Image: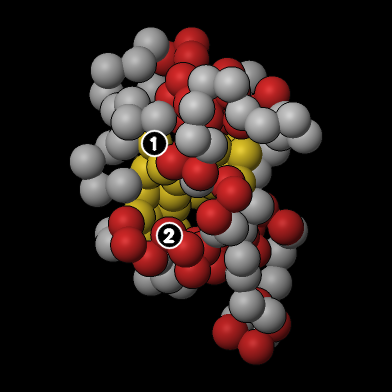
Amino acid sequence: MTALNLAADRRGGLLVGLEDPSAVGRLISHSDLLSSTPSLHPAPGHTSKDQLHYLLRDKCVLTLPTTILETIARIDGAFILDTDAHILAFGAILHSPDLAALHPENIEGGRASAAIAASRFGRVLKMSEDGLISFYHHGQHMWDM
């Protein structure tokens, strides 16, 4: 539902469901993980996003209100889930290889490139500002709606 609402509102986003949550360190930086912020009162120099990390740690998307999911999914960067739908990260910057080497015939925009790279680790929904929702898996674009 969150993906549909974001697409309908013409808001972009990237939702990644990891097949192997232990691979998350190969996809994003440790500092982007919700588990990276140790307490409600982070050390000086941490951002307000770190305070949200603490509040959303160990939360499952299946039990959170849609409005909260839409709000955090709008933060620039990827929204990462484990196999049990627990939030691992939001607003995360993805590590991605040089996609020109992987898919020289199919280089698109930044979000599409990130979706292709992230789909090597699981299933990815990409919401575009044009209202399109795309699904990627195993480094391949599977469908649009």
In front: 134, or 90?
90
For residue 10, side relative to residue 84 (left or right): right
x%, y% of residue 131?
Answer: 61, 32
Which badge, 2 or 1, comes first in the chain's sequence?
2
In front: 127, or 57?
57
For residue 107, side relative to residue 58 (left or right): right
Name the secondary structure under disc 1. Answer: strand
Residue found at x 58% / y 84%: 102
Residue 5 drawn above or below residue 85:
above
x%, y% of residue 128?
Answer: 64, 40
Label annotation for residue 76: none
Check disc 1 and give the amino acid type. Answer: Ile
Measure the alpha-carbon separation of dots 2 and 1: 12 Å
x%, y% of residue 65?
Answer: 38, 11
For residue 44, side relative to residue 20 (left or right): right
In front: 88, or 122?
88
Residue 145 drawn above or below residue 136:
above
For this orientation, the residue located farthest to the front is 43
In front: 118, or 59?
59
Label annotation for residue 87: 1
Which residue corresponds to mark 2? Answer: 24
